Image (spheres, coloured by chain):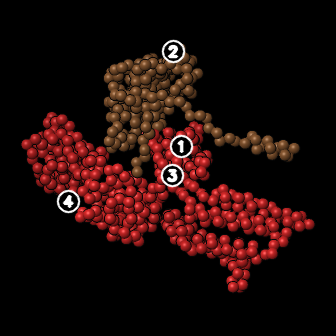
């Protein structure tokens, strides 16, 4: 026992710890440099239990090496102060890693929130008409506990998928709401396209094999008025219309605008207004999502895990597939005949502060467009604060708000700011006092000779 | 001396106290009960009672007079007009010797700021639209009035010297325009 104590308090153990740290940090640096992924390096090294064990090792080594001097003498004071400081800083780090909080809050100008997002965490969000329920989810989870009335079981977790949204052209046909599927015609120069003729209008679904829209347009001149949905080789979808006056209009179809049926609980669709020369004037198509599996990227930041869940409530049950939506931009999926909406997103945590973003701005270097700083005017708990990259706001309970990022889709659109929110439970009780003690101890050690004399 | 210096440092250190929040006034909706927006009160400004019938969009939702002759009007428009079109209209209203146009966004509104100077007059005007993402969020809500999605213009006209003197205050006033009830970030 004494031998173990001596070893744990020895300089050899300290050297072993320092060397191990050097090796692990070097390894992490190489991993990060090779994969361009901090998350991979963090997962392999920094979040590895071995790394936490090293921190505990330092704690034990410093504590035991101080205790080894017992009974303490006056000349030990600087040494003990320094070691007490180191122990406090280490304890602060460990406490922060276990009980601290670090998240992000992304706000559009004019928005307010009292929730933060924990990046790279996984949570299943179930929403009914009145409440939002969140359950943390892990790849080894089997049954997912939720406060909703649902019973949820995780049946599959895959590392990466690339979700796609199918709109107008699905399974080789044109999918219009209210019409049977119109077969897809692969257009070439020899065969004119065929379509589904209605008394008022003609629809076509076409696949352009390298032909230009103008070529197809000339082929369609004989049908008036008519609408053609064209899928190019790059899977881009375009709409070509010829109105009653023979005018041709083309439009690239994107997933905008999306129509929400019953706020998404009955699914989503795309809508196109064809104009007054057409009957019907408007067209809808329901959106369908697919989640094909892909090889997981090395950079974990880019990975989008796919989960399959067995969801049941009473006699109703359903297998649901969801893709990870790290940026909160995906559509929530209606489940159990539109009783609930489900999505797979990072965890959101309520905080005791409400933040409203009034204005976010980029400060440029004088006479240039190069950003000097990002700044945002926020109203935090009713009081106006300006947060910039070098000006952190700290609330009374120690929660700190940092300006992290600013994005703008267009100069005539509202800007979006990302704030980093963190709370360190031991900052004022351990970490800062510990740093003061280290400084004091180091100074005393520096002047020790004079002190001892 | 050292003790004095130490005590001096302690008592002259930075204070975290914030100025008291400004008082706000509300802006009524067009021909609907209740108000849509709030904006800070300008002390010394006279608030004119809005017309009982605001269906005519030429009538302002709010009208203030600052000092002797600075007129401040706030209009809302249910029909969306691109800020650039609004600016083009304003440009034609006077013979401006100097004009400045720049994009602006705050409190969820985005658009253009117009500043025009004639020989003796100055105009400061903001043509604003609620950001499209906010309009989408509002469309999802069950009870909001459609008027919340309106475009807003703030126009300040007055003698050049007086407007220039009050420019900072007038900017602060315009930038304080916000929805009565802030929009909650979607979850």
User: Do callouts 2 and 4 mark residues in contact (Cβ within 8 Å)?
Assistant: no
Q: Secondary structure at mark 4?
A: loop
Query: Residue B74, position in %: x, y?
Result: 43, 25
Q: Which residue is mark 1?
A: A381
Q: Nearer the viewer, mark 3 or mark 4?
A: 3
- Give the side of residue B1 with respect to residue A302, left or right: right
Mark 2 chain? B
Q: Nearer the viewer, mark 4 or mark 1?
A: 1
Give residue A384's position: percent from left, percent from top.
56, 39
Q: Residues within 10 Å of mark 2 (few under 14, many from 20)?
A: few
Chain drawn red in the picture:
A
Residue A89 shows in this picture: yes
Q: Residues within 10 Å of mark 1 (few under 14, many from 20)?
A: some
Look at discs 2 and 1 and give the one toward the viewer. 1
| Chain letter of disc 1 in the image | A
Image colour assigned to chain B: brown
* SS at circle 2: loop
Instruction: Please indicate whether residue A67 sits to the left or right of residue A261 in the image.
Output: right
Q: Position of residue A319 (x, y in %)?
A: 28, 65
> Who is closer to the viewer here, A366 or A69?
A69
Which residue, given by chain and number where applicable, does mark 2 sit on?
Answer: B69
Q: Quadrant of residue A209?
A: bottom left
Spatial distance from mark 3 to mark 2, Cα to Cα? Answer: 48 Å
- Of callouts 3 and 4, which one flags the residue occurring earlier in the amino acid sequence? 4
| Subunit bearing disc 4 | A
* Label placed on residue A171: 4
Vertically, is B120 above or below B4? above
């Amino acid at each position: 026992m004494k031998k173990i104590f001596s070893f744990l308090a020895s300089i050899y153990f300290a050297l072993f710890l320092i060397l191990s740290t050097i090796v692990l940090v070097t390894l992490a640096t190489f991993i990060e440099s090779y994969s361009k992924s901090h998350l991979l390096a963090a997962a392999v090294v920094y979040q590895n239990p071995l790394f936490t064990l090293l921190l505990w090792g330092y704690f034990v080594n410093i504590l035991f090496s101080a205790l080894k001097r017992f009974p303490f003498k006056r000349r030990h004071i600087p040494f003990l102060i320094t070691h007490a400081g180191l122990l406090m800083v280490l304890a602060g780090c460990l406490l922060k890693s276990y009980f601290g909080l670090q998240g992000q809050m992304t706000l559009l100008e004019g928005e307010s929130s009292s929730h933060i997002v924990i990046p790279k965490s996984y949570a299943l969000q179930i929403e009914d008409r009145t409440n939002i329920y969140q359950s943390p989810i892990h790849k080894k989870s089997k049954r997912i506990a939720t406060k909703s009335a649902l019973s949820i079981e995780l049946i599959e977790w895959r590392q990466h998928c690339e979700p796609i949204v199918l709109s107008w052209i699905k399974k080789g046909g044109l999918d219009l709401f209210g019409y049977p599927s119109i077969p897809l015609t692969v257009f070439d120069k020899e065969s004119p396209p065929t379509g589904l003729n209605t008394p008022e209008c003609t629809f076509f679904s076409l696949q352009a094999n390298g032909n230009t829209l103008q070529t197809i347009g000339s082929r369609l001149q004989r049908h008036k008025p008519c609408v053609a949905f064209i899928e190019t080789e790059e899977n881009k979808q375009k709409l070509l219309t010829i109105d009653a006056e023979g005018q041709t209009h083309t439009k690239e179809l994107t997933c905008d605008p999306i129509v929400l049926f019953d706020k998404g609980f009955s699914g989503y669709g795309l809508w196109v207004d064809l104009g007054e020369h057409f009957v019907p004037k408007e067209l809808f198509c329901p959106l369908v999502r697919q989640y094909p599996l892909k090889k997981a990227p090395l950079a974990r930041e880019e990975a989008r895990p796919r989960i399959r869940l067995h969801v049941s409530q009473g006699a109703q049950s359903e297998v649901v597939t969801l893709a990870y939506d790290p940026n909160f931009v995906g559509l929530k999926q209606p489940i159990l005949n539109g009783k609930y909406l489900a999505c797979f997103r990072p965890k959101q945590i309520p905080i005791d502060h409400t933040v409203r973003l009034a204005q976010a701005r980029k400060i440029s270097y004088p006479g240039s467009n190069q950003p000097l700083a990002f700044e945002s005017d926020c109203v935090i708990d009713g009081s106006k604060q300006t947060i910039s990259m070098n000006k952190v706001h700290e609330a009374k309970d120690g929660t700190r708000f940092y300006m992290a990022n600013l994005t703008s889709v267009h100069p005539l659109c509202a800007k979006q700011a990302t704030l980093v929110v963190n709370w360190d439970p031991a900052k004022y009780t351990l970490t800062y006092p510990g740093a003061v003690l280290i400084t004091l101890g180091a100074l005393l050690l520096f002047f020790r000779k004079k002190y001892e004399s | 001396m050292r003790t004095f210096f130490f005590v001096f440092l302690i008592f002259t250190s930075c204070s975290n106290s914030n100025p008291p929040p400004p008082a706000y006034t509300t802006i009524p909706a067009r021909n609907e009960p209740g108000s849509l927006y709030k904006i800070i009160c300008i002390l010394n400004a006279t608030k004119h009672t809005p017309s009982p019938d605001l269906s005519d969009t030429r009538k302002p939702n709010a009208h203030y007079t600052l000092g002797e002759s600075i007129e401040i009007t706030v209009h809302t428009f249910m029909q969306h007009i691109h800020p650039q079109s609004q600016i083009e209209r304003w440009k034609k209203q006077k013979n401006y010797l100097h004009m400045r146009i720049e994009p602006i966004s705050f409190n969820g509104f985005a658009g253009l700021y117009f500043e025009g100077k004639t020989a003796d007059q100055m105009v400061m005007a903001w043509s604003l639209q609620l950001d499209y993402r906010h309009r989408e969020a509002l469309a999802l809500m069950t009870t909001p009035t459609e008027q919340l999605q309106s475009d807003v213009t703030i126009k300040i006209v007055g003698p050049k010297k007086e407007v220039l003197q009050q420019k900072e205050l007038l900017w602060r006033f315009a930038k304080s325009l916000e929805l009565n009830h802030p929009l909650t970030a979607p979850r």
